[in-house]
Amino acid sequence: MGRKLVAYYSATDNTAKLAEWLADSLGADIFGIEPANPYPSPNDSETDCQKVSHPEIRCRRDNMCEYSLIFLGFPIWQCSIPTIIHSFLESYDMRDKTIIPFAVNEQECPICQTSMFKDLACPGAALLPGHIFSPDVQFQDIAIWGQCMNVQAEKITSDTI
Ligand SMILES: Cc1cc2nc3c(=O)[nH]c(=O)nc-3n(C[C@H](O)[C@H](O)[C@H](O)COP(=O)(O)O)c2cc1C
């Protein structure tokens, strides 16, 4: 299996904290996805944030081809995926990679479902089931989840060789 990357978008650092824990526990590299034009700003309503379709990303990760496994983290916005995550996936060739999404919400929301992860368009990649964490999750919880998903990803790789 190739290298592992934890890529994330975070507006208020909750996802950033989990992404750092995950990368530390897995020995993975980490990449913060940043919008070219900052959003949301204090004046943006929640609805406005999701109206920005395909926001431009500030910085490209040049060595994306070296990673075979990408954990992809983001906050839940309007019970859905922030549009910048779609921009990220469109920016690279994700074929033959394994992508494992994780999201952070505000509190237990009955409407936010892991089925939203199916909306992640990553042609040619294996999209594994994701998980929604609350912002007060502990290091141990995310580390255990990361290890379990890593084992699943390795199994997929060995089955396809
Ligand atoms: C534009 C916007 C929409 C949001 N929509 C939801 C939502 O539908 N459900 C929810 O539980 N939290 C929602 N939140 C709260 C964030 O998901 C939550 O605060 C998250 O932990 C923030 O992660 P971050 O610090 O990495 O940005 C929303 C926040 C923003 C800014």
Image: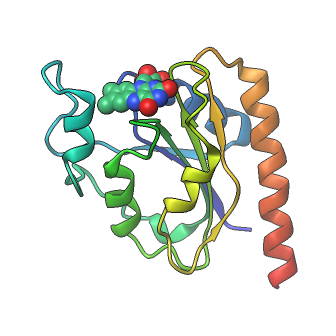
Q: Where is residue 59 in the image (x, y as percent from the top left)?
A: 26, 51
Residue 95 vertical position relative to residue 117 in the rendered view, above or below: below
Would you say 160 lies left or right of 130 here? Answer: right
**Which quarter of the rendering shows the N terminus?**
bottom right
As drawn, 91 above or below 144: below
Q: Where is residue 127 in the image (x, y as percent from the top left)?
A: 64, 65
Q: Residue furthest front?
A: 111
Which residue is pictured at 61% across the width and 21% down the height?
A: 108
Name the quarter showing ligand 1. Answer: top left
Residue found at the very far bottom of the displayed protein: 161
Can you say which quadrant of the picture contains the C terminus? bottom right
Query: Foreground: 109 or 123?
Result: 109
The percent position of residue 42, horizontal first and vertical second, equals 17, 18
Could you say where residue 99 lies in the image, as x and y percent from the top left? 61, 61
Quarter of the rendering containing residue 45: top left
The image shows residue 117, relative to residue 137, as above or below, that is below
From the viewer's perspective, tell me whether residue 49 is left or right of residue 4. left
Q: In the figure, is residue 121 to the left or right of 47? A: right
Quadrant of residue 77 within the rendered picture: top left
Residue 14 visible in the snapshot: no
In the foreground, 135 or 66: 135
Check the image and tell me how it is coloured. rainbow
Front residue of this view, candidates 89 and 63? 89
91 w.r.t. 161: above or below:
above
Residue in the image at 44% along x and 65% along y:
63
Q: How many numbered badges does the structure rendering display?
A: 0
Q: Is residue 38 visible to the viewer in this orientation of the structure?
A: yes
Asked whether, in this view, residue 65 is left or right of residue 67, the answer is left
The residue shown at (72%, 30%) is 142
